[in-house]
Image: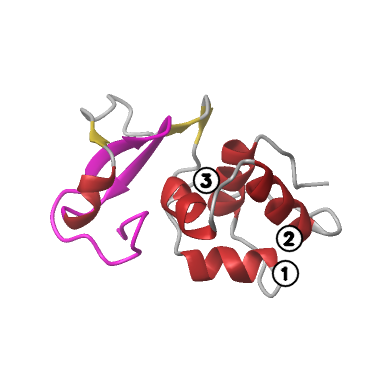
Amino acid sequence: MNCEICGKPIFGKPITIEVDGAYLKVCEECAKYGKIVNERKNNEAKVSGIVRPTKNQVEEEYELIDGYGRIIKEIREKMNLTQEQLGRKIGIKPSLLAKIEQEKIIPDYPTLRKIEYSLKVKLRK
């Protein structure tokens, strides 16, 4: 299993933390970025009231709306957030957020959901 913040492999048992209402499984080093919480009985973390897919579940297919990068950037700037601040909030590197805003890459499904939740916007068709 990989850390949901830094992406490094987790050796041993992952630590579950809460960051802005999102529950993440992280390594010991990244546990400092959130509040450590007890494990859920069903071993599923929740993000904004929606159960995250487990390894055995297929992630939802999605198509992004046109101009998704520009929309992300405009909303982020209206919220007076830098790329670094939003990246920290959703657990991704600022450089990845910059590439998403420039539409050089398409975010994976979990990252897309974190962006949508944090900015309160729907980016999927």
Tell me which corner region of the image, top left, top right, bottom left or bottom right, holds residue 11. bottom left
Residue at numbered disc 1: 103
Residue at 21% across, 47% down: 31
* Real-space CA distance between mark 3 and mark 1, rounded to the nearest whole angstrom: 27 Å
Which comes before the other along the chain, label 3 or label 1? 3
Residue under label 3, please give it.
Answer: 57
Identify the residue at image location x=66%, y=71%. 105
Q: Quadrant of residue 118?
A: top right
> With 92 as the anchor, is 99 left or right in this view?
right
Answer few, some or many: residues within 10 Å of disc 1's Cα (few below 14, many 20 plus, some between 14 and 19). Answer: some
**Classed neighbour count for the residue bearing mark 2: other residues with Cα under 10 Å, few (<14), some (14–19), many (≥20):** many
Which residue does the numbered mark 2 point to in the structure image? 69
Decide which of tag 1 and tag 2 comes sooner along the chain: 2
**Of residues 43 and 8, which is closer to you in this image?**
8
Range covered by the magenta-colored residues: 1-28
Is 112 on the left or on the right of 51, as rendered? right
Among the two numbered marks 2 and 3 on one chain, the one whose residue lies closer to the N terminus: 3
Three-letter residue code for mark 1: Glu
Q: Nearer the viewer, residue 77 or 114?
A: 77
Q: Give how far across and how far down residue 53 sits, in percent.
A: 50, 42
As drawn, 82 above or below 16: below
How far apart in space, not on screen, are marks 2 and 3 (Cα)? Answer: 28 Å
